[in-house]
Image (tube, grey):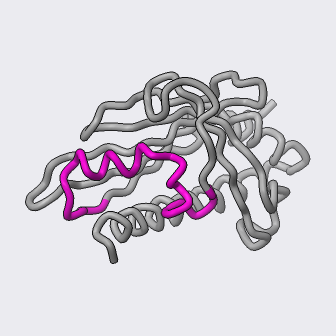
Amino acid sequence: MTQSIIDTSPLFELKADIHISATPLEVYSVVSDLPRSAEWSPECRGGTWVSGEPSTVGAVFRGENLRSEDVVAWAPLVRGVWHTECRITAAEPGRTFRWMMLTHAREDQESIWGFDMEPAGDGCVLTHHFRMGRATAGIHKIVADLDEDDRKRFVADWTAKLEQDLDATLKRIKDVIEKR
């Protein structure tokens, strides 16, 4: 039996960066405030902290998301409003902020998003990254009824979507911070 592309690890591993005219601590204060994510995220519309102290390691955030019909339109994705939960896994002011996506039962998944800040010139470089080791429960549900060719097509199309999201997120954060 041939292994599916969905069994590849990491399934996704992407990053993008941008220079922002602000200190790493100023940038950190914005990106670690997940309820503000509606200001910069292509899909997350904000949300609430449901346990732990906000923006600290171990805290759990429940995000509200909105996905349009045209996002990888051919794939059987969740559309409209949907919710996710994540646990903060790193919170080092001025340096890094990361979160791990959880299952509906609040179990860890190998789906980690984050921001790293590094001083550079008159500000800092903000890097936004995403890594999915093993496919999440959601990915398995999406591809369950797809043949292998469509699974490969989904991974390629989703990678392109993620690349666009990382770039769009960084540009929006820069605009928020630099008040454009």
Q: Position of residue 173 (x, y in %)?
A: 39, 62
Q: Nearer the viewer, residue 157 or 22?
A: 22
Residue 168 against residue 139 in the figure, above or below: below
Q: Nearer the viewer, residue 165 or 143?
A: 165
Q: Position of residue 118 (x, y in %)?
A: 20, 46
Q: Nearer the viewer, residue 68 or 34?
A: 34
Q: Position of residue 68 (x, y in %)?
A: 75, 69
User: Viewed as shown, does residue 97 lie left or right of 65?
Assistant: left
- Residue 9 visible in rendering: no
- Determine the residue located farthest toward the right in the rendered image: 145
- Residue 73 visible in rendering: yes
User: Viewed as shown, does residue 93 lie left or right of 171?
Assistant: left
Residue at 74% across, 38% down: 4
Q: Is residue 29 magenta?
A: yes
Q: Position of residue 175 (x, y in %)?
A: 36, 71
Residue at 70% across, 24% down: 106
Q: Which residues are magenta?
A: 18-45
Q: Quarter of the image for the C terminus: give it.
A: bottom left
- Determine the residue located farthest toward the left in the rendered image: 121
Q: Is residue 68 magenta?
A: no
